[in-house]
Amino acid sequence: MYKLEKNIYLQLCKLKDEFNLLGIKAEFEAEGTRINELGILSDLCSSSGVPLKLKVGGPCAKRDLYEAFQIGVNEILVPMIESACALKYCTDAYMSLIPIFESLKICPSLSVNIESKKAIENIDSILETIKKLSLPIKTIVIGRSDLANSLEETDVNSKLIMSLCFMLIEKCKKYNIKVTIGGNLTRNSYKFINELDSNIYAFESRKCTFSNLKPLSQCNFNSLINDALEFELSWLKFKKSLYQIRSAEGNSRISKISNMV
């Protein structure tokens, strides 16, 4: 168990030192991360000096927001923001928690996902609401996979998704909001990311967010993606081991009790 945790720690350090890792992401939404897993990942990130981002279950997931503050994550990412109303709801919930945790000096930043056809249609009102109400949204993450599915597009690297990304980037620039590109990043995504160039703040895989401040060669990008996937694989193996050990402990007790009744 200790060996697996140490391996994850070393991988985090490598990603941070060699590829300008901005943060590690856990998800209540797609991954269904459990609280104990989040606690372990939080400790590993803290030990390696890597920020932790938590993707909550949605705009109405108040309990998730509370857990994010309680565990001390550095950033909260809210998915499925499709309207100004949804945005206002989640930011109100977020703002209500700040005074509660003020004594702990914990105040994670807040980012939102734009990842559907409806969100694209409502992007002007969403951005205008951020400006008008001075909402604490510093970054928008474009979720290419869900966006492509919403548009019935099979390729996240398609010209359609590229054009929508450029459109969103230009709109966000006017409001001084940073843009991060996500959604099924693979080695084949290099051309897509490279074309966006310095227009984006960062790009992210399922688990890792990387700065886009320095140009990357195809070779370096491939290495980055490979190491990000290796980290994710190590984390999944760690979780598997964690529950296998707990299951074995339970099985032992089950056997003992069964022999007594």
Image (cartoon, rainbow, N blue to C red):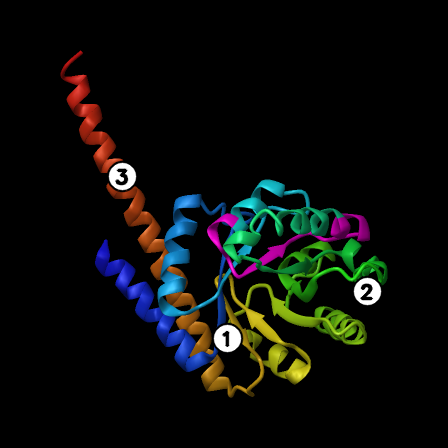
In magenta stretch: residue 169 = no
Q: Is mark 1 on a helix, strand or loop?
A: helix
Relative placement, left or right, of 245 versus 49 is left
Of 26 and 232, which appears nearest the observer?
Answer: 26
Which residue lies at the image location 14% right of the left edge and 17% below the top edge? 259
Which residue in the protein does label 2 denote? 131
Query: Which residue shows up at 62% across the image and 52% down it?
Result: 98
Residue 130 in which image quadrant: bottom right
Please tell me how crowded label 1 is: few (under 14), some (14-19), or many (20+) other residues with Cα within 10 Å.
some
- Name the amino acid, label 1: Arg
Observer-side mark, 2 or 1, equals: 2
Q: How many numbered discs?
A: 3
The picture places residue 95, in percent across and down from the top left corner, at: 68, 51
**Residue at position x 45%, y 77% from top?**
224
**First along the sequence among labels 3 and 1:** 1
Whether the residues at callouts 2 and 1 have beta carbons within 8 Å, the answer is no
Query: To which residue does mark 1 refer?
Result: 187
Quadrant location, the C terminus: top left
Q: Marks 2 and 3, how far apart in space? A: 49 Å
What kind of residue is marked 3?
Arg
For label 3, the SS is helix
Q: Where is residue 28 in the image (x, y as percent from the top left)?
A: 53, 47
Nearer to us: label 2 or label 3: 2
Residue extent of the magenta highlight: 70-88
The residue pinned by badge 3 equals: 246
